[in-house]
Image (cartoon, helix red, strand yellow):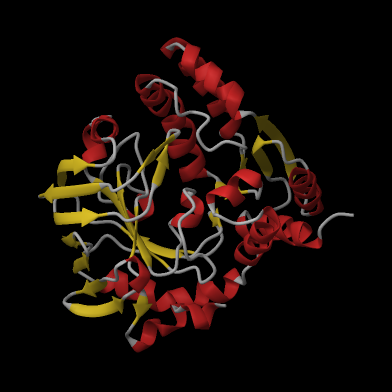
């Protein structure tokens, strides 16, 4: 018997997140072995008059392909997949790989080549900018292990998070989005962190289930050369199959001039991918009430209640500071007391302390209001 929670998730993805309309072509891109959600999505897209297309990938095959790929080959792959993406109005990406580290031993130069030649034109330029898209994970043993939970407990957690009332959350985000649009100076304070920058005139975007599931953030972007100070991220981050920990950046006039981590050489290799990788492309506040601890999965970690992320690399066009890069790396700082606490100031006014919004118009985003 099909899990009713799965059917609800598929209906929300097709009807709310991607808003399938009659005649829409929608690509379902599955990485992993899960099939039932794909079948549910095919049915839901068809119900709405859309045309579902399916791509099923295996990360172990991708690993071997990338280790042996040439630049000419990747360019041909990009041309092929870009042509398909250009014919899609919608995209639903499901990530359910069994091993988070499958790409961990692919040479760094191959991964950078893949990002530049394939992922950037197909996904960052075409899919992100020109389709109605949503990306999500699917619960499996690997994710449960990363979250330090049993598989059954993780499945319950997953559906609580992913089937949240995102319409209610969307309305509660309006005051924060409006405030960010009016804000000039931002200051972030936490252990090892004292960072200032401006978001004046950049704008703000609320994220309430239309691009990511799970969701729960409002983002903007620093003026490119305005960032100064230091930030010490306190969550691990998986990037191209390697887990980075204790990442610290020092900024001067927008640029990361010093970067350290558990593998400082590998970290700086990522930041040296291109000029834009050492500048910031996104600043966001996260507040999903069900997500409390990191699990090395950015779709969950960037939404952690009481968190923020500060992202080296590519800026989004709807909150654009002009920074361009093949990198877009969401790195997370949690400011709840058990993670060391911290404050967020907008124009010298304290708006969040220890992960809790403290001004009346933003209290609707605190956990007790969203659950």
- Which residue lies at the image location 46% right of the left edge and 17% below the top edge? 75
Query: Which quadrant of the rendered structure holds the C terminus?
Result: bottom right
* Residue closest to the far left: 252
- Asked if 355 appears above or below 89 in the picture, the reply is below
Quick check: can you spot residue 254? no
Q: Position of residue 258 (x, y in %)?
A: 14, 42
- Asked if 207 appears above or below 88 in the picture, the reply is below
Q: Position of residue 159 (x, y in %)?
A: 67, 62
Q: Is residue 175 left or right of residue 197?
A: right
* Residue closest to the far right: 1
- Which residue lies at the image location 28% right of the left edge and 78% below the top edge? 351
Q: Is residue 153 left or right of residue 343?
A: right
Q: Position of residue 259 (x, y in %)?
A: 19, 42
Quick check: can you spot residue 195? yes
Q: Position of residue 299 (x, y in %)?
A: 50, 52
- Which residue lies at the image location 43% right of the left edge and 57% below the top edge? 302
* Residue closest to the far bottom: 360
Instruction: Tell me how many marks there are.
Output: 0
Q: Nearer the viewer, residue 86 or 145?
A: 145
Query: Which quadrant of the rendered structure holds the N terminus?
Result: bottom right
Q: Residue 115 falls in which quadrant of the image? A: top left
């Amino acid at each position: 018997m099909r899990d009713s929670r799965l059917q609800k998730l598929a209906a929300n993805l097709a009807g709310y997140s991607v808003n399938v309309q009659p005649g829409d072509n929608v690509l379902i891109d599955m990485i992993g072995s899960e099939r039932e959600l794909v079948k549910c999505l095919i049915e839901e897209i068809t119900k709405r008059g859309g045309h579902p297309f399916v791509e099923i990938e295996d990360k172990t095959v991708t690993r071997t392909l990338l280790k042996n790929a040439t630049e000419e080959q990747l360019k041909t792959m990009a041309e092929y997949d870009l042509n398909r993406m250009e014919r899609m109005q919608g995209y639903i990406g499901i990530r359910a790989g069994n091993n988070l580290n499958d790409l961990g031993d692919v040479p760094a130069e191959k991964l950078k080549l893949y990002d530049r030649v394939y992922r950037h034109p197909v996904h960052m330029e075409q899919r992100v900018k020109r389709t109605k898209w949503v990306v999500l994970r699917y619960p499996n043993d690997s994710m449960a292990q990363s979250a330090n939970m049993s598989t059954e407990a993780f499945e319950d957690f997953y559906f609580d998070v992913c089937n949240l009332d995102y319409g209610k959350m969307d309305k509660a985000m309006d005051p924060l989005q409006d405030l960010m649009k009016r804000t000039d100076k931002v200051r972030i304070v936490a252990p090892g962190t004292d960072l200032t920058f401006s978001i004046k005139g950049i704008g703000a975007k609320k994220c309430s289930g239309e691009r990511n599931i799970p969701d729960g953030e409002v983002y903007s972007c620093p003026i490119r050369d305005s960032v100064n100070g230091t930030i010490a991220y306190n969550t691990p981050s998986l990037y191209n199959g390697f887990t980075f920990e204790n990442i610290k950046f020092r900024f001067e006039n927008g640029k990361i001039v010093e970067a350290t981590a558990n593998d400082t050489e590998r970290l700086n290799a990522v930041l040296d991918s291109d000029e834009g990788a050492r500048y910031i492309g996104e600043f966001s506040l996260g507040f999903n009430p069900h997500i409390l601890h990191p699990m090395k999965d950015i779709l969950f970690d960037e939404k952690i209640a009481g968190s923020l992320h500060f992202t080296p690399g590519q800026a989004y066009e709807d909150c654009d500071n002009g920074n361009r890069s093949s990198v877009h790396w969401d790195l997370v700082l949690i400011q709840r007391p058990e993670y060391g606490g911290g404050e967020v100031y907008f124009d010298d006014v304290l708006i969040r302390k220890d992960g809790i919004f403290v001004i009346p118009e933003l209290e609707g985003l605190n956990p007790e209001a969203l659950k």
